[in-house]
């Protein structure tokens, strides 16, 4: 296992590159950092607190957790952790767990509905708290897995963007861990001894397509080291004219420019 100093430096560099390349944070921003209790969101909060200290601009952070009332959820863990850390925070209580379990047919995955309900609640919370940006803890692996899920199962080329505007146009969503490897986050979480809270809702579903795609990428990485880095570069190096989307490129009016023969 890499030592704490090395992996911390890796994450600082990756998050710094994402923030700079996609202009994620600007002077005067108030960023709502969504904290689930998983390793990714803990690491994201740490990274955001680091850049709040060292960045040449001033911005504010508030950590927010949505208590979805899942059975066995330890309600005291996050408030205790955040209080000890000295971070401004808010816990939102909303029984989305009951809605998801009632609306999801037996044998179907709960992720889609759970995600929509959670997203809507967090967007509203951001507005109520006066935040203009909302930070999510998705990392490089999440972005690649989502790309292949859409490619293989939804018939579209799409993934999680590092920065986007919500449908209402009043909130910017950022993913500061976009360039971070999940393996580095795992090592960092072990060093930091975060009080991890497992998700009993989606984490218990063993046959998710995402898990299969995740394994596929891991197998590729084992056979061809650094393949994930190459794929991330590909997502930033797109040639619309070399795809087949007629809305993205004007194939209809494409004309050759062959000079007239004398």
Image (cartoon, rainbow, N blue to C red):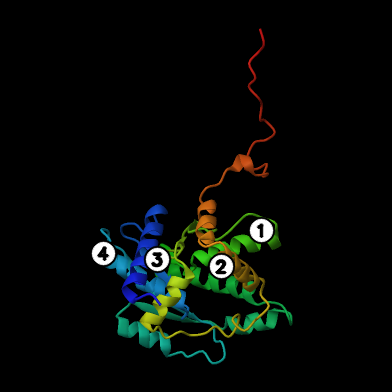
Cα distance between the residues tagged 3 and 1: 34 Å
- Between disc 2 and disc 1, whose residue precedes? 1
Please give the residue where the numbered disc 4 appears in the rendered image.
Answer: 54
Depth-wise, is mark 3 or mark 1 nearer the camera? 1
Crowd around label 2: few <14 · some 14–19 · many ≥20 (10 Å): few
The answer to whether one can see residue 255 in this image is yes
Q: Earlier in the sequence, mark 2 or mark 4?
A: 4
Sort mark 1 into few (<14), some (14-19) or many (20+) by Cα contacts within 10 Å.
some
To which residue does mark 1 refer?
Answer: 151
- State how far apart marks 2 and 4 are (Cα): 36 Å
* Figure quadrant of residue 143: bottom right
Which one is closest to the eye, mark 1 or mark 4?
1
Q: Nearer the viewer, residue 46 or 1?
A: 1
* Marks 3 and 4, how far apart at CA: 21 Å
Q: Which residue is identified by label 3?
A: 131
Cα distance in 3D space between marks 2 and 1: 22 Å
Give the number of the mark in front: 2 or 4. 2
Asked if the residue under mark 1 is in contact with the one under mark 2, i.e. CB atoms within 8 Å, the reply is: no
Which residue of the protein is positioned furthest toward the right in this rendering?
Answer: 106
Judged by depth in the image, the label closer to the viewer, 3 or 4, is: 4
Helix, strand or loop at label 4? It is helix
Residue wearing tag 2: 222
188 horizontally vs 167: left or right: left
Q: Residue furthest bottom?
A: 72
Query: CA–CA distance between discs 1 and 4?
Result: 39 Å
Point 38% across, 67% down: residue: 11
The secondary structure type at the circle numbered 2 is: helix
Count of marks, rendered view: 4
Callout 1 secondary element: helix
**Front position in the image: 143 or 112:** 143
């Amino acid at each position: 296992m890499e030592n704490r100093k090395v992996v911390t430096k890796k994450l600082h560099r990756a998050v710094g590159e994402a923030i700079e390349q996609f202009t994620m944070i600007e002077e005067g921003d108030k960023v709502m950092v969504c904290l689930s209790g998983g390793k990714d969101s803990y690491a994201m909060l740490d990274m955001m607190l680091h850049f709040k200290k060292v960045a040449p601009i001033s911005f504010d952070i508030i950590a927010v957790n949505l208590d979805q009332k899942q059975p066995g959820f330890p309600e005291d863990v996050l408030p205790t952790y955040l209080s000890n850390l000295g971070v401004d925070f808010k816990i939102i209580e909303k029984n989305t767990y009951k809605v998801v379990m009632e609306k999801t047919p037996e044998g179907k995955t709960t992720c889609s509905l759970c995600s929509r309900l959670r997203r809507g609640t967090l967007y509203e919370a951001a507005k109520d708290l006066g935040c203009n940006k909302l930070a999510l803890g998705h990392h490089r692996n999440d972005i690649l897995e989502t790309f292949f899920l859409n490619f293989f199962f939804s018939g579209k080329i799409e993934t999680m963007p590092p920065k986007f505007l919500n449908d209402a146009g009043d909130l910017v969503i950022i993913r500061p861990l976009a360039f971070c490897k999940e393996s580095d986050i795992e090592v960092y979480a072990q060093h930091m001894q975060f009080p991890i809270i497992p998700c009993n809702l989606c984490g218990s579903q063993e046959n998710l397509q995402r898990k299969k795609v995740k394994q596929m990428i891991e197998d590729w990485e084992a056979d061809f080291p650094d393949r994930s880095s190459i794929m991330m570069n590909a997502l930033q190096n797109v040639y619309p004219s070399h795809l087949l989307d007629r809305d993205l490129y004007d194939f209809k009016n494409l004309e050759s420019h062959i000079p007239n023969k004398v």
